Image: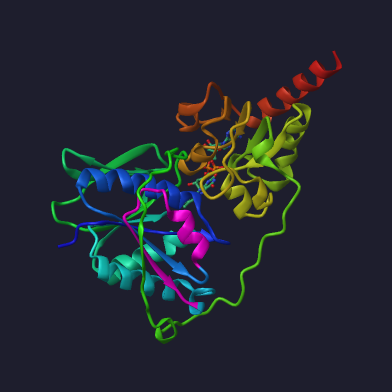
Amino acid sequence: MARDVLVLVEHSEGKVESLTSQLLAIGSRLAKEMKVELVAAAIGHRMENVVEALQGKGIDRILVVDDPGLALAGGEVQAHVFAEIGKQVEPRLVLVGYSLVGMELTPAIASKLRMNALTNCVNIELRDGVITVTRPLFDGTIHAQIALEENATAVVALQKGPAILTAPLAKKAVVQSITIDVNSIPSRSRVLEITEEPKGDVDLGKAEIIVAVGRGIGDQEKIHFTAELAEALGGTLACSRPVVDVGWLPRERQVGASGKSVAPKVYVACGISGAIQHLTGMRDSKRIIAINKDPNAPIFQVAHIGVVGDLFEIVPALTKAAQEAQTR
Ligand SMILES: Cc1cc2nc3c(=O)[nH]c(=O)nc-3n(C[C@H](O)[C@H](O)[C@H](O)COP(=O)(O)OP(=O)(O)OC[C@H]3O[C@@H](n4cnc5c(N)ncnc54)[C@H](O)[C@@H]3O)c2cc1C
């Protein structure tokens, strides 16, 4: 009978991703409440540092597949290997990060293990003994609560949330090595190389004032309005993901679940709706000022000061006021 909680580990350069640490903190709490084991599955090549980094996180067993064939493995091979581990563990729950990797692997793993796939979730908890998952709908304006049937199994992909600080746990995980013939796994594509994005000179993490621009700006030619406000306030220009996706600003300026997490003294959101993936990266800002023409935009739920109106009127007026204040 499927029982344990299995967490799929994401790592790079020997370090465990913060999203995985978040999953392990959630998984450790769930496993305790469900009175089952927390198992971590880590696959890749030269895994010593990853295994070391996984200790002290409340895991009972770490299952490792360490194979040179996994150094540059594509999603098809990774899904196959994780599913093989899943077949051995027979878990009740598989927790995956809703990262780009997790988005690719979750449906494949769920289908191979014949489990439910619940993606884009923001919470999972045991409510009166029932595993209940929370999932945002309509850009986070409403949330669905989904209860798992008593014996149902599921692969649950969870979004990056606020970091969960947990003290290191003394429990030492048992490490088990699993051998899988990686080279014989059929694969229709292969990863040629992994290259790092060139490092820019923007460090959003250190910025005390951030002016962030969203899709509401409508056109790359108009981004200068927000850049001028950032300059007048002595701040840094940032943006939401669609602005990066269309190539208006580089990825190093993106705030959110798949971008940077920031907590400046002041965060001015211009033409940003406030989707959960954006809020995840900026909701810890000390003072949030939102400018949006839609009074129902979710950004106003986290804003300390909300301005309902056209950013093309408000942003230049703020810039002028900031410039005048400097010359006074
Ligand atoms: C796995 C995953 C990861 C993601 N990661 C991120 C991430 O890291 N960061 C991120 O930002 N998003 C991320 N997203 C995308 C996210 O879901 C939203 O689609 C995105 O944040 C929306 O960006 P936006 O608010 O700029 O655009 P929209 O949602 O289109 O909002 C534009 C807003 O501008 C307002 N507006 C329009 N014109 C004006 C005007 N003239 N004056 C004032 N207001 C105006 C509108 O009312 C609207 O509220 C992710 C999504 C997924 C699925």
Q: Can residue 70 be seen in this view?
A: yes
Looking at this view, name the residue that lies furthest to the top: 328
Any magenta on residue 83? Answer: no
The residue lying furthest to the bottom in this view is: 184
- Where residue 68 sits in the image (x, y, percent)? 51, 78
Q: Where is residue 303 in the image (x, y as percent from the top left)?
A: 52, 25
Residue 46 image position (x, y, % from top left): 52, 70
* Residue 99 visible in the picture: no
What is the quadrant of the N terminus in the image?
bottom left
Residue found at x 20% / y 57%: 3
> What residue is rendered at 70% in x and 42% in y?
203
Residue 255 sits above or below residue 200 on the image: above
Q: Nearer the viewer, residue 223 or 84?
A: 84
Taking depth in this image into account, of 132 and 180 the one nearest to the observer is 180
Q: Nearer the viewer, residue 238 or 191?
A: 191
Magenta-drawn segment = 47-67
Q: In this view, does 226 lie above or below 113?
A: above
Relative to 299, is 14 above or below? below
In this rendering, position of residue 325 left or right of residue 129: right
**Is residue 62 part of the magenta span, yes or no?**
yes
Q: Which residue is drawn at 35% across and 65% down?
A: 107
Its colouring scheme is rainbow
> Residue 61: x, y in percent?
33, 59
62 displayed left or right of 265? left
